[in-house]
Image (cartoon, rainbow, N blue to C red):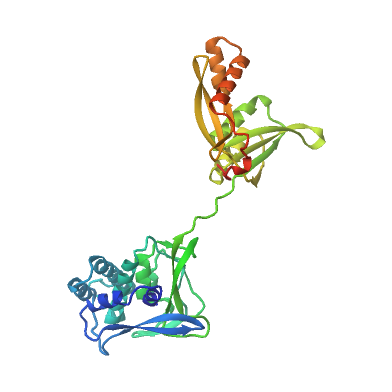
Amino acid sequence: MLLGALLDVGVPPEVPTEAIAALHVEHLHLEPQQVSRQGLGATLAVVHAAAADEERTWPGVRALLDAAPLPPTVRDGALAVVERLARAAAAAQRVDAEEVPLRELGTARELASIVGVLACLEYLELERLTASPVAVGSGTVPFRSGLQPVPGPVVLELLRGVPVQAGVLPEETCTATGAALLAARVDDWTPLPAVRPQRVGTGAGEEDPEELPNVVRLVLGEPSRPAPLLPVVVEANVDDLDPRLWPGVLDALLAAGASDAWLTPILVQQGRPAHMLSALCRPDALTSVQSAVFSATSTTGMRVVEARKVALERSLASVDVLGGQVGVKVATAGDRVVNVGVEFEDVVTLARERDLPVKEVLRAATAAAEAAYPADPASRVEDAPPLWG
């Protein structure tokens, strides 16, 4: 089914055919067929092999793959997959991996499917491969030694640490070979991630049950950038905090990651004067900001509200004032200046150095900033891109 999905998504049949031919096993060849599974068109990858096939062990398969003129990445990948199969079978049977017979896991058909899938994956040059939780089935299946539970012990061993589920059908829905390929090549186990689909391939299984389409789908696409998370405003009403503590509270919130913090005088129950503490922050800073609110104030609860913020592009500069330097913040919309303001702390410092009133230095600094960065009267706030930083 994996091989069928890869062919259906657009991999040329010559890619897996050449890899299979490199195994030099007589009567082994691939025949893709177009079929329907419950109304879904799909590719069935039929691998033909001799009627009587040799039963191989892990050393025998390793020797066969080592001798095959396969591309190094395909050969090494196949060796890694078969070694997973051997070690899982050995763990299930509690024998040495070098001695365990692979039985149907090591047949020519299975080896052809493995090298075919790996050759197709190398052809696609995928940056990342994700898969949804694996439906392994349930019930029992006949085996050489009798009935075995589903999922089988080898499949479960191969899928250690992988999210699995029983699925709809009370039968085997994931083979050991499929489990080994997935465990070896999948990077993330998740439902369909945010992606822009470009090609979709559907691989069919041999059976056609009535309960659901027996297919595996492969979606190729570019990662889709998720919508940015909205900033949040944390609010708390406080009526029993010493007012002298508020400057330190605001400093603590800013240090915790808030992009802004402020106080609003309010009246609460029974006409008591109070303050509403507000802090704007990114979602990833919410936990630390909440912790700072609880640590620095006497509140026992707070509100968290999503907010939308529109901000102009901002840059920092400086202007010469009275023989000194004062920082300037310039706000623009595109290439037009909308607002310009001076850094008040720089003004206060310069006023002390020059022994001048702060208002005179502020007036001079403002005039210098407006002369250096004149505002465009045609600027509009709506030109500013929506940001949340």
Percent position of residue 99, x then y? 23, 74
Q: Residue at x 63, y 40 (%)?
A: 381
Q: Furthest residue to the bottom?
A: 51
Vertical relation: 381 (above or below) 243: below
Quarter-wise, where is residue 258 in the image? top right
Query: Residue 22 vs residue 180: left or right?
Result: left
Vertical relation: 135 (above or below) 320: below
Query: Residue 334 vs residue 31: left or right?
Result: right
Percent position of residue 283, x then y? 56, 46
Percent position of residue 94, x then y? 30, 72
> Is any part of residue 170 visible from this angle?
no
Query: Residue 267 vs residue 200: left or right?
Result: right
> Is any part of residue 119 visible from this angle?
yes
Q: Furthest residue to the top?
A: 355
Quadrant for the N terminus in the image: bottom left
Quarter-wise, where is residue 369 in the image? top right
Query: Residue 158 vs residue 135: left or right?
Result: left
Q: Residue at x 23, y 84 (%)?
A: 54
Relative depth, front residue between 264 and 378: 378
Vertical relation: 51 (above or below) 116: below
